Image: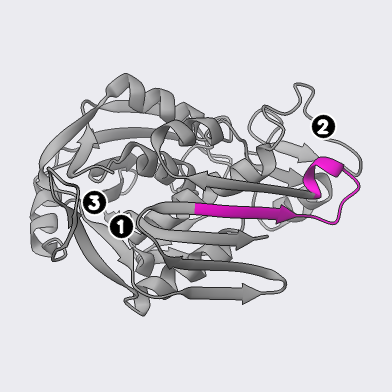
Amino acid sequence: MQVFQRTIAKEITFSGIGLHTGKKVNVKLLPAPPDTGIVFVRTDISNLPSIKVSPKYLSKLYYATNLSNGEISVQTVEHLMAALSAFGIDNLFVYLDSEELPILDGSSAPYVYLFEDSGVKEQKKKRKYLKLTKEISIEHDNKRIKAEPFEELIIDNTISFDHTYKKIRYQRLVYSHNLENFKEISKARTFCFYHEVEALRAAGLARGGSLENAIVIDKYDILNESGLRMENEFVAHKTLDLVGDLYILGYPLLAKVTAYRTGHALNATLVKTIYQEKAYEVVELEAKSQKITTSLLGNEEAYRKTLRESPAF
């Protein structure tokens, strides 16, 4: 685990189509000072309103992880958040000119490429971790997720679907969170069932979805001619989503997370419960021994000052 905070070493720009809105969006990632956190800034709105990643802003968790603070919303943040978690990026300004991040190829692999190309920069302030202090369990409609105190982030994730396509009936992945392991699951794409597509579009969702950015499963097989990228791509993507959703806590979580048939809504309930019940202590690592020590949360006013002085898009 890393001792000091990180940001990206240089500016990153990219564009694409939102999975649910179908709108084109341009994105610029800029380095941010220590204790800034991950901050989204809407450049399509004249006063450049922003939203800092926090569990209190989680909203509309239907087929995506979205943030809203009453002034602005930012949708489908989970694939970016997962990659930021894996690269240990604590501080970043994300400028975007629409309400939804681009889906790219449906995975986090493009972010891995972008962050490896830009590089990461170590900062002088210590990184803060959330060390879970008690077990938290959430269960709903035969779906469940549990977090237990642990010294690192471990995820034991199982998916199960009542479906004729055997590769999605049952898959399990035990994942230890580090960059090399994340690179493997980062290639896994989002997926949906063909019979859901019309309902999703009727609800105003999946307007930018296609076989170029999602796996689509019909009654018997997948419709993607290129096939799967890996045998366990379905559970790997659900694990990728979970990594991103957990990073909404604002700091990396130290816990063992066991999940069965979980999704964004259940993940968010876990994150909100940990946050609202303050079921954690904020800790740092000592530089030499990497011994965990307690610390205080970052200064909110310092964050606000940083944002006011940040460069425009």
Q: Amino acid at mark 2?
A: Leu
| x 50%, y 49%: residue | 76
Q: Residues within 10 Å of mark 1 (few under 14, many from 20)?
A: many
Residue 52, horizontal then vertical, whole percent: 28, 56
In the rendered structure, does residue 162 fall within the stretch colored magenta?
A: yes
Q: What residue would you read off at disc 2?
A: 223
**Element type at marker 1?**
loop
- Closer to the camera in the image, 96 or 124: 124
Which mark is nearer the camera, 1 or 2? 1
| Pointer 1 or 2: first along the chain | 2
Rendered location of residue 65, percent (x, y): 50, 55
In which quadrant of the rendered image does the N terminus lie?
top left
Q: Which amino acid type is marked by label 3?
A: Gly
Q: Residues within 10 Å of mark 2 (few under 14, many from 20)?
A: some
> What span is in magenta?
155-169
For mark 1, what is the residue?
250
Contact (Cβ within 8 Å) of mark 3 with mark 1: yes
Q: Nearer the viewer, residue 27 or 292?
A: 292
User: Residue 173: x percent and y percent?
Assistant: 62, 46
**Element assignment for label 3:** loop
Residue 128, located in which quarter of the rendered image? bottom left
Q: CA distance from mark 1 to mark 2?
A: 37 Å
